[in-house]
Amino acid sequence: WRAGGIDSAHLSRIGVASSPRAQPAREPSVRQMATLKAEQAAAAPAPSSAPSSSAPSAGPRPVSELAPAALRRPRCTPLDGDPACLSLLSLNLLAPAFVRPIDTRTGEVQPYAAFEWAEPADEVLDWEARRPRLLALLQESKADVVCLQEVQFERQGDSFGLPAWLALDGYAAKIPGQSHLENMAERNKRVLENEVAIGCAVLYRTDRLEALPDDGISNTNTLVPVCVRGLPSSPLATLEPTVVFSVHLDAQSEEKRVEQFTKCLGIIRACGSREAIFAGDMNTECWDGSCLTAFLAKQAEPSEDAIIRECAAALRLSSSEGGDDDDEKAAPAVEVPLDGVPTAEQLAAWRALWARAAGSALAQRVALTRVLTGPTRAAFEHGQTSGPCATWRLDHIFYSARTLELRSLWETLEADPEGAAAGLPNRISQSRRFRAVAAPEPLIWTLPSDHHPVAATFRPSPAPRLDAAAEEALMALLAALEGAQEAARSELQADLEAKAPLPAPAPEAEQATDGKKKKGGKEKPSPEMIAHIQETRKRTREQKEVHLQARQSFVEVLGELDLDALERSMNLSTWLESGTRSLP
């Protein structure tokens, strides 16, 4: 049985007769891998908290690993070159309300919103100057899916809606829920004296994609998902249900970013899928050692130096950066050691967070790969007051490589040293005037946001699955296990009934004063019956525990395709818990 790897000893333990056919060797199961990663992280030696001249430092920033040159395209190259490919663009728009506002809590403009390099402001920062360029970029990309962050929604009667300028022809939109938008507007009114709702959105082409129902899934301001599949009549017909997220992860807390991503994994599974694309402003560079990279498939345990570097960077950021969270919800201040090296306790917490993220991805069976994009943010270094600007890679695309093959991606700031040095947003220079150029020469644009867009195309393919014979064999073993457990329950029931003591004779009803018989009260069971009831409960409870362990043992050795087959036929969680099959 190709789906097997279950030897005769294992079948005997779970109460199923084994087949004489030899079973092939298997890779570690999902649960075994999750347990192994958690144990490895917990067992990693913690460095001494005592100062040491040889203690590793946070070290320099790593160098970005870029995708092969054959896959990279100049930014703003139209993405519709291959109709059989799914194309995606992601961009943080830089909401106009977040450009140099006065924060009522401090009476000043927050450093992250000052954009000192962006002058003259009427050409670089003014919304009426930036919006037409943003719109042109989105329209000319011809992307199937557009993931946006910092969309400034418009009040439309009693609710918020997509601004009119983003109502692109041929696209449908998914936006945050109204309660989340109202809360955001109230917050901005209190903090910025500007009652506007700002959040993420997903636009998708309706001539190539259809959205599937997602009842009960909440779209927040920072996480907006839509489950799409290719229209049967389109070149994307092979695209199976895939959950696309526009994300804007927390700017200060790695723990919050992990929580947000973990929530997304649950949404993917709630949509009945394992395929996904995450795109957006993730507010982390995703270097080795970052806890967000633990969500990636085949991610090796990070080195000690990487753990120290990323933990130290996160602590410095959370202690020194002003965010746009309200004070009541702000994370408590953290102590950053003077030597820049986190304490043993801080490193242990970081390792635990990394292990939690890795375990979540494995437990939910969502395998993600990162598109190797470069830097997307250019600004003054912290404390710097003049150029050139530094760069960071904060915007990313994660995708399910088992059903999506990366075919191309846009270059980022590594291909535009002039723009990177000037900072983002930047204005049109005389030498790089905004214009449309006929193919094959790529379009030349300036950057009207503080983030560089990221974009990629993917060739979709159906998810692998068991062949018919292997699936039939799997279901036969499942039925055998269920049959064995049902027989054991019947045997226990019969044995308990055979050992039940005879009921005591009912007492005669007492005679009332009016000559009628009184109703007999509830008699206390005999000592023999009480002992039998206790024994029945004990043996039933023990059998349920044995059966639960047998079902878990059955599932633990299964591979990905085996588990996919089971999940197509039933709700696996319910079956594991109760042994009862229900619809998926």
Image (spheres, grey):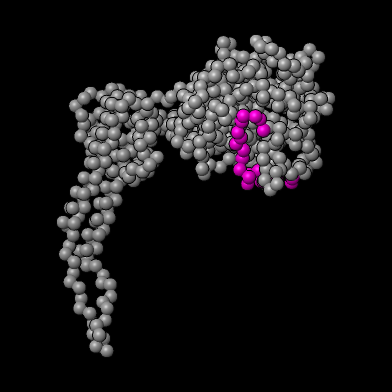
Q: Residue at x 18, y 59 (%)?
A: 500
Q: Residue at x 65, y 10 (%)?
A: 440
Q: Nearer the viewer, residue 317 or 157?
A: 157
- Tally of numbered discs: 0
Q: Nearer the viewer, residue 115 or 42?
A: 115
Q: Residue at x 36, y 43 (%)?
A: 582
Camera sees residue 507: yes
Q: Quadrant of residue 206?
A: top right
Q: Quadrant of residue 289?
A: top right
Tell me where residue 256 appears, x and y as whole percent: 58, 37
Q: Which residues are magenta?
A: 167-190
As drawn, is 319 to the left or to the right of 582? Answer: right
Q: Nearer the viewer, residue 408 or 247?
A: 408
**Image quadrant containing the C terminus:** top left
Q: Is residue 177 magenta?
A: yes
Q: Is residue 29 magenta?
A: no
As drawn, is 247 to the left or to the right of 368? Answer: right
Camera sees residue 285: no
Tell me where residue 66 appears, x and y as whole percent: 58, 16
Tell me where residue 376 appears, x and y as whole percent: 66, 22
User: Residue 371, relative to residue 507: is it above or below?
Assistant: above
**Image quadrant containing the N terminus:** top left
Q: Quadrant of residue 155?
A: top right
Q: Residue at x 26, y 81 (%)?
A: 518
Tell me where residue 248 appears, x and y as whole percent: 62, 33
Query: Farthest residue in the front direction?
Result: 233
Query: Farthest residue in the bottom direction?
Result: 514
